[in-house]
Image (cartoon, coloured by chain):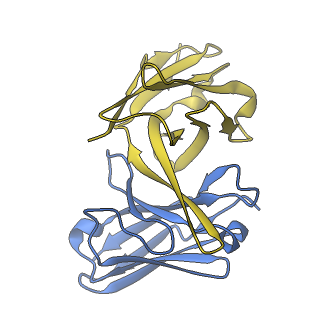
Chain colours: A yellow, B blue
Amino acid sequence: QVQLQESGPGLVKPSETLSLTCTVSGGSISSYYWSWIRQAPGKGLEWIGYIYYSGSTNYNPSLKSRVTISVDTYNNQFSLKMTSVTAADTAVYYCVRESSGKYSRWSYWYFDLWGRGTLITVSS
Amino acid sequence: SSELTQDPAVSVALGQTVRITCQGDSLRSYYASWYQQKPGQAPVLVIYGRDNRPSGIPDRFSGSTSGNTASLTITGALAEDEAEYYCNSRDSSGDHSVFGAGTKVTVL
C-alpha cells in the first residue's frame, strides 16, 4: 500500500533553513494534493501548505513568506523548505496526502494518508 | 472567516454517546473532515465528506453538518476512543486548509 516517509535533519539552528523531503512509496504522486502539517509539542495541528502534483501550490498565510513546497514527480517525492526558523518552529512535521470529492454542491477535502512524522528541533 | 471552533474537552461514560462539534463560517460551503489522534501517534482520518468512514473505521463513528456546525458522533464509546479529535476544512476562499484546536475526549 502507499506509504509516506519524512526525512531530514532533526536539529536546525535558529535563523537557518529547515529542509524536509517526503518519499511516496507504493503508489504514484500523480493526481493528488500533497501537504505538510506540523504540530508543536503539546499543541494542535497546523497546516503549512500543499502542492498539487502538477506543481501548483498554496500556503498558510501566516507562514507564506518563509515556506516553499516543491515536487519531484520523477523520484515520487515532495519537499518543504522553511527559512529563518526560530524556536517556535520546533514541531513534529508530517507529510500528508490530501484527497478531494464533491457531493451535490458541497466540495470536500480530507487528509487520508499520513507519514509517521519527524521531530524538528530548532536550537543552537 | 478562517477559524474552526471546537470545545476543548468532553467526557463520556463507557458505552454512551458523545457528540463533538466544530463551528465555522466555511462549513456552510465545505464539509469537514475529522481526525483522531492518540498520544505519540500520527492523526488518523475517521470521517470525511457528507458522512464517510475510511476502511477500518468502526461504524460507531458518524458525521453530520447543520448550518455552520459540523459534528462527530461516537455512539457507544469504547475506552479505545479516548483521544484528541480535530476537525478540518478549507477556509471560505477554498484555498487554504484550517484545523480546529482539537477536543480531548475522555471515556469514563
Q: Residue at x 67, y 34 (%)?
A: A56
Q: Quadrant of the C terminus of chain B?
A: bottom left
* Residue at 25% in and 63% down: B56
Residue at 49% across, 24% down: A73
The picture quadrant where one finds residue B23 is bottom right
Q: Say if residue A39 shows up in the picture.
A: no
Residue A46: x and y in percent read: 57, 45
Residue at 74% in and 61% down: B92
- Number of marks drawn: 0
Give the camera-side residue of B103 and B22: B22
Q: Residue furthest bottom?
A: B16
Q: Nearer the viewer, residue A29 or A20?
A: A29
Q: Is residue A63 left or right of A110 when viewed as pictured?
A: right
Residue B80 shows up from this direction: yes
Relative to A63, does residue B97 appear above or below in the rendering? Answer: below
Report the front residue among B58 and B24: B58
Q: Quadrant of the N terminus of chain B?
A: bottom right
The answer to whether residue A34 is above or below residue A18 is below
Q: Is A84 placed left or right of A43 in the picture?
A: right
Whether B89 is drawn above or below A30: the answer is below
Give x and y (percent) for residue A88.
60, 32
Q: Position of residue A35 (x, y in %)?
A: 53, 39
Q: Quadrant of residue B57?
A: bottom left
Q: Position of residue A21 (x, y in %)?
A: 46, 22
> Of B28 and A75, which appears nearest the observer?
A75
The answer to whether A35 appears left or right of B52 in the picture is: right
